[in-house]
Amino acid sequence: MSRKESFKLNEETRRRIDEEYYAPEGRRVRRVRARAVKPAQKPQPEIKSEPVYASIPSDYDYDYDEPVLDDFEEPKKPKKHRLRRLMIFTAIFCVVVILLNIAFYYYRGQIWFNEPRKRDYPVRGAVVDEELGEIDWEVMSQQTISFTYIRATKGTTTVDEQLKSSRKGVKKTDLLVGFYHEFDFSADGEKQAENYIEQCGDLSGKLRPMVKVTKYGIYNLHMKNAEDVKESLSEFLDAIEEEYGRRCVIMCDSACYEKYIEPYFDDYSLWIIDHFSEPDEYEDWALWEFNPRVRTEGYENSKRYFALSVYRQEKDIDNFKKNFLMD
């Protein structure tokens, strides 16, 4: 069959189909080509693919000088970053070393942050007790001190173990010497004075007696009633003044000063303990203990400390003798 005849046949076939499917109104029915509908598919989860690293053969021939990294080798950091980290580490290390040295010398008492200048406070003295052990007074006198106070007694019965040896040894030096009593809040004042007088005896040519009134033991937490302390301390002070004809010097910390000394004994020579700053708030202070952690050569228990004090600012040794030396 020729191509032309085939075309006519197709036309005839189309005509027949159209006649069979004419609408009643005589209009041709529109033919719609059916399309296959795909069934709805469920959304598939997104799969993240890991990067694929191609293995590099060991016998690969490279034409350039760049280093080849292994699978687990991290890229090398630039030298600039390493140098910066080294500088930061070195700076931190130096600061730590400096702070440790400051703490060490502070603990040993070799440096003190509130230490007054020698030219402003030329008269200095040491306060010692039995904790230092036996003292070599020739060595001690070579320190930058002009006077010393040695503990004699405490309470009604206690006597310092080193009193006799210290009293004998200090005579060989040029130091001005005085003896002090450590006050007991719970003991009778007159009996405490009797203990001091019995042990110290004649004080001619010595410094005026001193009584140390500071918190200790349970009294650090609960200070005793002011009226009770006033009564026993007055008994002690009166007995000492009657025996030696001179008033005591009172050494005290800030808490005891405010509670016991200022209200009743403000006309006595005052020795203030203040380890942080100059006691400017106390107008009439005569002596100031500024450092309790001094350690030098010249005594048996080399790991123990003693306290260092100064006389009033810009007062010389002659003024000190005039006010503190006994006849």
Image: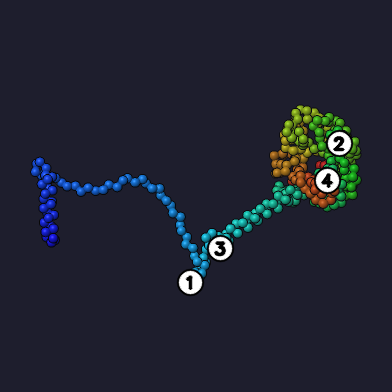
* Point 82% across, 51% down: residue: 297
- Read off the residue under disc 4: 132
Earlier-in-chain disc, 2 versus 4:
4
Mark 4 crowd level (few <14, some 14–19, many ≥20, 10 Å Cα): some
Asked if marks 1 and 3 touch (Cβ < 8 Å), the reply is: no
Q: Nearer the viewer, residue 132 or 70?
A: 70
Amino acid of disc 2: Thr
- Read off the residue under disc 3: 79
State how far apart marks 4 and 1 are (Cα).
82 Å
State how far apart marks 2 and 1 are (Cα).
96 Å
Mark 3 crowd level (few <14, some 14–19, many ≥20, 10 Å Cα): few
Amino acid of disc 4: Leu
- Read off the residue under disc 1: 63
Residue 254 position, x and y percent, is 72, 37
Q: Relative to residue 77, is residue 134 drawn left or right?
A: right
Dot in front, 4 or 3: 3
* Point 74% across, 35% down: residue: 220
State how far apart marks 4 and 3 are (Cα).
58 Å
Query: Does dot 4 land on a helix, a strand or a loop?
Result: helix
Dot in front, 4 or 1: 1
Asked if marks 2 and 4 touch (Cβ < 8 Å), the reply is: no
